[in-house]
Image: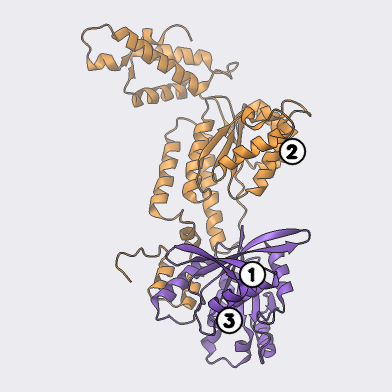
């Protein structure tokens, strides 16, 4: 054997190749180890993949708040792992049905989480590519009879090997009996059965609308075993998000600006303000503050490093 | 596409089984995809007769890589498309030829991802007295390794030869609890049952 020839990743199979084990011994050893399926998938188990999985998990942990979501993600990751190991040890394993429903207001981290799920499932060998295809009603529903199934199938094809993320999914059932949205749902359900191993579908939308949507479509409820609720952020969490966003961009709030931001956020969140945009609202405020700070500084002759970094109260402004 | 892998000891008739099955299904020209242990893939189209002449022979280890054939099995009105993967024979002992050892490792690695495992045994061989008590070891280990899965079945091949009846009885005793189909790949007997088993389990 040439020295630089790639060795078989599985130690048992490598032993067989190098003449250390007979096929009988190899079979015995394989039966006792869970390594086989892992190395065959070429996914879980190899160090770089575990590392990347941990990286995705760390990225999830770095998100502010979302405690329930994080706990649930760990649960799912553990579940997938154990089912894989069970299958490798010849125990009956639950089929991995990982279609999900995300309900929550806009800006609560649904898309971000979906993207991370794609990454994690790829590293764990559940999905081949793990890319996220983000679609909404208009991408799935057609204009004339027969058009819808065709359009929906097209989008599903693009998502194979990854995640099909349907935003505002309840809109598919909004038009009543004659609406083409129904057809899109039917096509989707069919594809979920056909491509069971290749596709994960995530339906996302506002909490109340999603609840009615799922309750009125029993076929959907039974096919989406995982429901994740994304609660609104509290004012403190939003402030933390703001700090994080600014830090990434090398900016800082001074005390008055921070108080002003807190005031805006506390007024805009809480009951009665479900559609305020949550983290997206924070991003909009900050991006505008950055523009206003630039306007304030642009005519000055001499700028210190400090001045370039500080966001003042007037940059945040009174509107919002 | 569903994969059905054909495994067993050398010279039990794995390749012949796959090719005869294709012939039984009235396939005239067959496209065989060869996948070497190092991962290179190529395919060739054979007339069945030529494939039988080139790929099957009396010496052990005629097959030294994965040879896959896509066959359409009729089911009721429709068809089921199944990829049959023919493999390198697995020996009891450590083989002295490195390329064959590699091919055997490739075979073992291919077993787990396959949806269905057909384990071929030589009924005539089983009918004779085993040379040593260890001689049945590989088949036993293979049966335990792959046998707990839904679609696993044993094909007792070479039923047209003398002593095969006795061998079948012995195999049925040794592998009680597993599904065993007596088949003669040469005479094309027993294929209907095997076909039905494959269709039902995929």
Which residue is at 72% across, 26% downward?
A: A174
Provide the secondary structure element on which disc 2 rests.
Answer: helix
Q: Position of residue B46 (x, y in %)?
A: 57, 69
Q: Which residue is mark 3?
A: B12
Q: Chain of mark 2?
A: A
2 or 3: mark nearer the eye: 3
Foreground residue among A185 and A280? A185
Q: Chain of mark 1?
A: B
Q: Which residue is mark 1?
A: B152
Q: Position of residue A34 (x, y in %)?
A: 49, 62
Look at the numbered discs 2 and 3 and tell me whether their residues touch, using CB distance below 8 Å: no
Q: CA distance from mark 2 to mark 1?
A: 36 Å
Q: Position of residue A159 (x, y in %)?
A: 56, 41
Q: CA distance from mark 1 to mark 3?
A: 17 Å
Residue A312 position (above or below residue B194): above
Q: Is residue A227 visible?
A: no
Look at the numbered discs 1 and 3 and tell me whether their residues touch, using CB distance below 8 Å: no
Horizontal placement of A234 versus A292: left or right? right
Question: Chain A hue?
Answer: orange
Residue A262 position (above or below residue B93): above
Q: Share a chain, discs 1 and 3?
A: yes
Its colouring scheme is: by chain
Provide the secondary structure element on which disc 1 rests.
Answer: loop
Foreground residue among B99 and B155? B99
Question: Chain B hue?
Answer: purple
Q: Position of residue B4 (x, y in %)?
A: 61, 66
1 or 3: mark nearer the eye: 3
Q: In what quadrant of the picture does the N terminus of chain A appear?
A: bottom left
Q: Which residue is mark 2?
A: A218
């Amino acid at each position: 054997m040439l020295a630089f020839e790639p060795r078989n990743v599985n130690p048992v199979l490598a032993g067989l190749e190098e003449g250390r084990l007979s096929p009988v011994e190899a079979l015995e050893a394989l039966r006792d180890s869970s390594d086989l399926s892992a190395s065959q998938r070429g996914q879980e188990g190899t160090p770089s993949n575990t590392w990347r999985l941990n990286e995705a998990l760390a990225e999830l942990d770095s998100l502010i708040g979302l405690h329930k979501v994080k706990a649930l993600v760990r649960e799912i990751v553990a579940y997938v792992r154990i089912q894989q190991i069970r299958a490798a040890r010849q125990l009956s394993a639950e089929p991995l049905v990982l279609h999900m429903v995300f309900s929550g207001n806009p800006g609560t981290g649904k898309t971000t989480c979906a993207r991370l799920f794609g990454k994690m499932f790829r590293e764990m060998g559940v999905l081949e590519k793990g890319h996220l295809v983000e679609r909404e009603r208009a991408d799935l529903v057609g204009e004339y009879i027969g058009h819808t199934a065709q359009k929906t199938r097209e989008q599903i094809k693009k998502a194979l090997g990854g995640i099909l993320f349907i935003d505002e999914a309840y809109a598919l059932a909004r038009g009543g009996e004659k609406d083409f949205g129904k057809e899109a749902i039917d096509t989707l359900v069919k594809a979920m059965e056909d491509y069971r191993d290749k596709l994960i579908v995530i339906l996302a939308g506002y909490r109340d609308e999603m609840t009615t949507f799922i309750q009125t479509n029993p076929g959907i409820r039974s096919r989406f075993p995982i429901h994740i609720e994304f609660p609104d952020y509290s004012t403190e969490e939003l402030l933390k998000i703001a700090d994080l966003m600014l830090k990434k961009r090398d900016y800082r709030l001074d005390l008055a600006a921070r108080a002003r931001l807190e005031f805006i956020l506390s007024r805009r969140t809480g009951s009665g303000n479900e559609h305020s945009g949550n983290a997206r609202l924070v991003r909009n405020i900050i991006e505008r503050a950055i523009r206003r700070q630039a306007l304030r500084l642009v005519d000055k002759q001499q700028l210190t490093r400090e001045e370039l970094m500080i966001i003042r109260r007037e940059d945040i402004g009174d509107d919002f | 596409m569903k994969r059905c892998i054909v495994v067993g000891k050398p010279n039990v008739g794995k390749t012949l089984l796959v090719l005869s099955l294709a012939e039984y299904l009235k396939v005239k020209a067959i496209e065989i995809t060869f996948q070497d242990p190092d991962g290179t893939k190529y395919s060739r189209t054979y007339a069945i007769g030529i494939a039988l002449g080139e790929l099957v022979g009396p010496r052990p280890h005629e097959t030294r890589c994965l040879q896959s054939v896509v066959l359409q099995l009729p089911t009721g009105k429709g068809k089921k498309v199944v990829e049959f993967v023919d493999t390198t024979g697995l020996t009891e002992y450590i083989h002295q030829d490195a390329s064959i050892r590699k091919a055997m490792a490739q075979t073992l690695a291919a077993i787990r991802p396959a949806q269905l495992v057909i384990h071929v045994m030589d009924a005539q061989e089983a009918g004779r007295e085993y040379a040593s008590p260890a001689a049945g070891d590989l088949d036993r280990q293979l049966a335990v390794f792959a046998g707990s899965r839904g679609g696993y079945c044993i094909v007792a091949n070479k039923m047209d030869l003398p002593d095969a009846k006795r061998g079948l009885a012995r195999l049925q005793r040794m592998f009680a609890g597993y599904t065993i189909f007596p088949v003669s790949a040469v005479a094309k007997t027993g294929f209907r049952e095997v076909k039905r088993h494959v269709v039902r389990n995929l």
